[in-house]
Image (tube, rainbow, N blue to C red):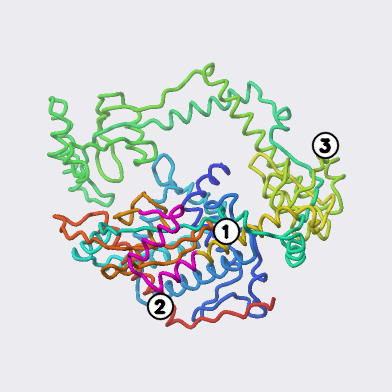
Amino acid sequence: MLQSINDRIQGWLGWVIVAFISVPFALWGIQSYLDVGANKFVAKVNDTEITPAQFDRALSQQRARMQQMFGKNMPKSDAYDKILKEQVLNQLIATEALNQYANDSGYAVADASLAAAIRSIDAFKENGQFSQDLYEKVLNSQGMSLAGFEAMYRQELSSSHIQNAIMSSAIITESDVAATQALKKQQRNISYVTFSVNDYVNKAQVSAEEAKQYFQQNTFRYMNPEQVSIQYIELKSEQLENEVPVSSADIQKSYDTYVANAKANEQRKARHILVSLSSDAGADEKRLAEEKIKKVEKELASGAKFSALAKKYSDDEGSAENGGDLGLVSKGMMVKPFEEALFKLKKGQISGVIRSEFGFHIVRLDEIQSEKVETLAAKKSSIEKELKESGVQNLFFERAELLANLAYENPEGLDLVAEQLKLDIKKSKLFSRNSGTGIASHAKVRNMAFENNILKENLNSDAVEISNKHVVVIRINEHKLATSKSFDAVKAGIIAELKSNKARQMARDDAAKLAANMSADNSFENWKKQMSRLKAASKTLGLVTRDSDKSDKQLLQSAFKLSKPETTKVSFKQIALNSGDAAVIAVSSVKDISDKPAKADAGVLTQLNNQLANKEFTAVVAAIRENAEIYIPEKKAD
């Protein structure tokens, strides 16, 4: 069940919950960014404080998103961390300001709307249906109360109503679409000259003295990373399989439960005729009701169609028009007298008169839908496997908890822990914060190893859950501080880097000379002359659209940003390409396509509408924030 719940919170609900509830750890403490001091908050929007805990949760959530997007290419610099934290804080401020605006503007979410929205969340559904039990278990597993989640989600819905109202007001006209389509179809006569870094590398000269000076000025870039090796005790569920026997009695008991559940899941398709009679009805009302139900009973005995009589006589407005059809009925859905009578009937059989709190019923059973019950012989293997897995998992949870407790109670070493649990103490190879082998290939283990209390205080760690079947406890075995690499070890790399830098600058200098020449004379004739002079590096695309596949997208984007050239002239620009090369690009003519489409392109219309809607919403949020009183404590001095 724990794994099932964990799987369910990985999607949309997971992001909602992560954003609003406590987690047992944070990737950074807020103190590393903001000086909360005595304020105990990272920002204040009007009279509402954004707490360090809220910031840590949102930061952890955003970092998880970035990790998912970038994977191993996730940026790790201090500058990136700083930008990420500022973005998260700004988002929290904007969200709080919008929430306050929603509340002040009366954007209330009715209880019925809130309930409907929650019931539609897939994470709370079993077999396509909302499950109250699962709903509670998911929230409990995250340490969140129903009231807390519902208040949070109500606020989310309220804010989204404002967003939808603003964004739905964005209007794009057909003339807007026509103008955009015309720009998409516009053609430009483009040519360019590329100054490739590779053509200059051999010309670039770097002396050993230059390289050494660069090394001395940038020693921090050439470091052997800080490393540790660890002692650890690991517990895997597979180690416990021999400790969990499954007896024949266990299998029989589980099979009996399976059979009972299969029977309990039986559904019956039924019709009924109701003659209503309240519990406080007088004698005359009771007599009339009894006469009516007896009349129905008599007509049924005479061969009348049940569905026709239901339409004619039944007081149940919900089913009468459908011939008394109740659909599929499970146990627990109906009042007891009705249910008991229904589940005694055989297919096609009609009951006698049934008295319930609603009046008198006559029921016909049309169909029985029940789960096929397999024999014990057929189920034995799967039952034994399920019992073994369940027993192992339960024992694993018990041992994992004991492992964590023993490691905490005996922080100075792992010997007693290993002795009590009859497990081995293992040692890893040296590893850094960002990479390792064996047990250190797991990021959770590396992160724990470099925690301050583990690294500097030399204590046992908390239990690290690598998976729901694998946990470890660690402590530091060896710690090696970061050291500077020798110049000889990095000399070749530095020379190559400096040569590349010089070659890049040489390419840009030559591109700048060409641009300066064109600034003095931007005639088309001069451009042709320059292209002829630099023929090997020149290329003419001719008339192309902005989405052409004839050239690099960066070149095309730059060309389509240039102004329209005068007759016999060119518009030009020097650009630095992402590859490191330099280029000068020129546009000699622009061809506008004036044909008017019979109908606006639906894709263009949607794109423009979304752009305008997002722009307007962003502007409104900025205005709301501007009108709010926002206070952010000063950052700590570096």
Instruction: Indicate left or right for 431 with 331 as reference.
Output: right
Is there CB contact under 8 Å for labels 1 and 2? no
Mark 2 closeness class: few <14, some 14–19, many ≥20 residues within 10 Å = some
Quarter the N terminus occupies: top right
Compute the Cα span from label 3 to label 2.
Answer: 62 Å
Compute the Cα span from label 1 to label 2.
Answer: 27 Å
Q: Earlier in the sequence, mark 3 or mark 2?
A: 3
Which of the two marks, 1 or 3, is nearer to us in this view? 1
**Amino acid residing under circle 1:** Arg
User: Which secondary structure lies at badge 2?
Assistant: helix
Q: Is residue 531 above or below residue 382?
A: below
In the rendered image, which quarter is residue 325 located in? Answer: top left
Q: Which residue is mark 1?
A: 63
Residue 97 in picture, x, y percent from top left: 45, 75
Q: Is residue 415 above or below residue 295?
A: below
Which of the two marks, 1 or 2, is nearer to us in this view? 1
Which span is picked out in magenta? 511-540
In the rendered image, which quarter is residue 89 located in? Answer: bottom right
Q: Which residue is mark 2?
A: 624
Residue 528 belongs to magenta span:
yes
Residue 109 in picture, x, y percent from top left: 36, 65
Residue 422: mark in rendering: 3
